[in-house]
Amino acid sequence: MTLSVRFITKRFIGEYDQTAESKYKYSTMVDGEQMAFEVLDTRSVNDDCGAREDVLRWADGYVLVYSVVFRKSFELLKEVQKRVEDYRKGAASVPIVILANKADLAHMRQVTREEGQLFAASLGCPFIELSASEDVSDVTEAFHSLCRDIVEYKRRSRTFFGRVLGALGREKVS
């Protein structure tokens, strides 16, 4: 919730209900184009870690977040990513951005930057280490990066399906 609210309002909220899901709508400029965001900020105290089928079906892309000061969040993130991969089988690489939050708490760090970078590299997705409390520009860039990836993903998908459907159409006509 902190990252979503920070992106949309530019304000930092330190305390929030960690069990409630929130859905936000927000429009902003990304690379000179007006973009509409619908952000579903998931929470879960269950084994699904918020990666339920209804959520996975709903999303065009995913911001996967862990805390650098809480190793278990990093391990759970790998499980969430696996759920995304399993659910979206057959789809080209679904847009994902990996965010390592709380970088300002270096003295409490349990997950290294390199671990996060390696995980993101293994998925072929962007990695951003940031502090939601300190720099709104990093949070904004994370969401904008995901937006760019979603637009490109949809562009490639349309092109691919256009070629396939076009080829099928030509075969029927011949």
Image (cartoon, rainbow, N blue to C red):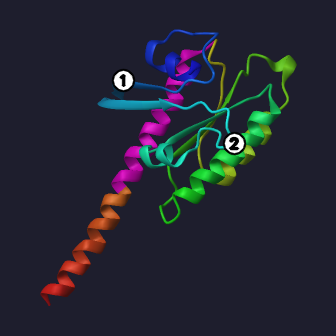
Residue 115 placement, left or right of 90: right
* Identity of the residue furthest to the front in this view: 46
Q: Bounds of the magenta span? A: 134-155
- Quick check: 66 above or below 155? above
Amino acid at circle 1 = Tyr
Q: Residue furthest bottom?
A: 174
Picture coordinates of residue 144 (x, y %)? 45, 32
Report which quarter residue 134 is drawn in: top right
Residue 10 rendering spot, x and y as whole percentages: 48, 12
Residue located beneath label 2 in the image: 47
Is label 2 or label 1 in front?
Answer: 2
Q: How far apart are the two marked residues, 2 and 1, measured between alpha carbons? A: 30 Å
The question of residue 14 being in magenta is answered with no
Q: Position of residue 170 (x, y in %)?
A: 18, 82
Q: Secondary structure at mark 1?
A: strand
- Tell me the residue at 63%/12% (across/down): 133
Displayed quadrant of residue 13 = top right
Mark 1 is surrounded, within 10 Å at the Cα level, by few (under 14), some (14 to 19) or many (20 or more) other residues, namely few
Which tag, 2 or 1, sits closer to the chain's start?
Answer: 1
Identify the residue shown where x is 71% and y is 21%: 102
Prevailing secondary structure of the magenta residues: helix
Nearer the observer, 124 or 32: 124
